[in-house]
């Protein structure tokens, strides 16, 4: 059983195999002349992971009471950054 994607892929591969050099050149030139076209490298190659921060942080372990930890986590995603902000403010940094 084949999917629509597999069928489309087979058809594209057949069309590429049957393409003449003149047709390939015409398509390439048309793509280069199209102001809306972007190089495939820019579209397909995304850098993985989080971007590097200018100032990195140091990972530490800290013991907190269950109530404090529960209250911090209840503030939602980014609670560790908010803890860092509070500590920096309290320390005058």
Image (cartoon, rainbow, N blue to C red):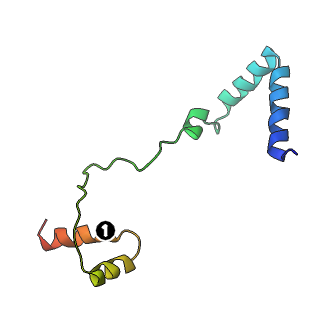
Quadrant position of the C terminus in the picture: bottom left
Q: Is residue 51 above or below residue 74?
A: above
Front-lying residue, 56 or 28:
56
The residue at which mark 1 appears reads as 80
Front-lying residue, 66 or 88:
66
Front-lying residue, 88 or 28:
88
Quadrant position of the N terminus in the picture: top right
Percent coordinates x, y for residue 36 in the rendering:
64, 39
Dot 1 lies on which element? helix
- Quadrant in the rendering for residue 64: bottom left
The residue shown at (69%, 30%) is 31
Percent coordinates x, y for residue 20 in the rendering:
82, 16
Report the residue that reaches farthest toward the bottom: 67
Report the residue that reaches farthest toward the top: 21
- Quadrant in the rendering for residue 13: top right
Residue 86 horizontal side relative to residue 38, left or right: left
Percent coordinates x, y for residue 12 in the rendering:
81, 32
């Amino acid at each position: 059983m084949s999917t629509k994607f597999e069928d489309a892929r087979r058809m594209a591969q057949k069309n590429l195999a049957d393409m003449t050099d003149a047709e390939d050149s015409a398509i390439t030139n048309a793509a280069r002349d199209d102001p809306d076209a972007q190089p495939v490298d820019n579209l397909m190659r995304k850098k993985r992971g989080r971007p590097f921060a200018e100032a990195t942080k140091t990972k530490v372990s800290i013991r907190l009471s269950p109530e404090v930890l529960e209250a911090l986590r209840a503030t939602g995603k980014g609670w560790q950054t908010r803890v860092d902000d509070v500590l920096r403010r309290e320390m005058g940094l």
